Amino acid sequence: MFVRNESFYTFRRNYPIVTSLIAIHIVLFFLVFLGQIGIFPPGIWIQHLGVGLNLAIAEGQWWRLITPIFLHADLMHMLFNSFALFLFGPPLEKMIGRTRFISFYLGTAVIANIVTFILQPLYYSHVGASGAIYGLLGMYVYMMIFRKELIDASSRQIVTVMVVIGVILTFLNPRINILAHIIGLVAGMALAAPFLLKARNFFTIPLVRPERKEGNDIGFDPNRWKKKRRMPIKGSTIMNVVGIVFIILVVIGLLSNLV
């Protein structure tokens, strides 16, 4: 469910919202970086006007509840949030549709930012997409409890591990915005039900499908095992390795997250 084996073109076509969000992360990060080193001065203003600064929000700059979702503190912060979105975003975009996915993604992040504004001091500032990422994890947790038909056993194990590690590290790293993580997770669980009303599992695909003969009879190719045997094993091995690598990266990202 979480392992991607598409080409870049196929991934972009199948998951345009996830692709666009990751592209925004990358573009804005480099514009801000170029501003910081003096090559692109407007990049400084992107950072200055986009940071979630509670004092500025209190003065009426409401857009700062949204813009921090797309900005990041440093390269590692941006990369690991993007990896997490790459890992957890595509299945949900496919399940619930593009419009619902972006609404859910932004909605959970904004809720986390609103709570951060209410409960943190006026001088507090923050950037990052972790409120939205934890919102996605919250939807998976909801599926694990109430919509088990939408998530397979191996994916449930991955989500459980990620949530447990993420919550533990949230309280161990003093630089993390604890409210963004916890409220994002809770908001994802609370808002999941209406977004999943018409969802179905697009990712449980039989490994071997019956081959149709002429007419309505269904038959099987007697040589199907010879044709199918080696490819699934090879593909499965590669996919498992890639999946493990991404999980490790996301765990490290949660450890170093500055949201």
Image (spheres, helix red, strand yellow):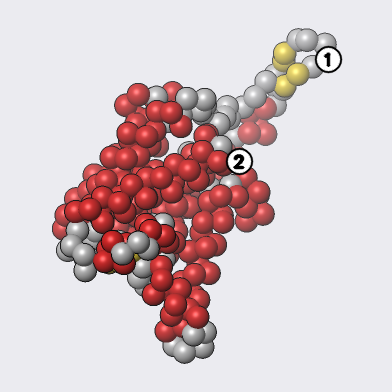
Please provide percent x and percent y for residue 190: 32, 34
Give left or right: position of 35 versus 210: left
Please provide percent x and percent y for residue 133: 38, 50
**Pick the front one: 117 or 164:** 117
Residue identified by numbered label 1: 214
Looking at the image, how many numbered discs can be counted on the residues? 2
- Gap in angstroms between the C-alphas marked 2 and 1: 27 Å
Callout 2, which amino acid? Answer: Met
Please provide percent x and percent y for residue 112: 31, 50
Residue identified by numbered label 2: 231
Neighbour tally class for label 2: few under 14, some 14-19, many 20 plus, Cα within 10 Å: few
Q: Nearer the viewer, mark 2 or mark 1?
A: 1
Q: Earlier in the sequence, mark 2 or mark 1?
A: 1
Please provide percent x and percent y for residue 131: 34, 51
Residue drawn at x 65%, y 24% is 209
Report the residue that reaches farthest toward the front. Answer: 59
Res 105 seen here = yes
Callout 1, which amino acid? Answer: Glu
SS at badge 2: helix
Query: For the C terminus, which image quadrant?
Result: bottom left
Residue drawn at x 56%, y 37% is 97
Position of 164 relative to 124 (above/below): above
SS at badge 1: loop
**Pick the front one: 104 or 258:** 104
Res 165 seen here = no
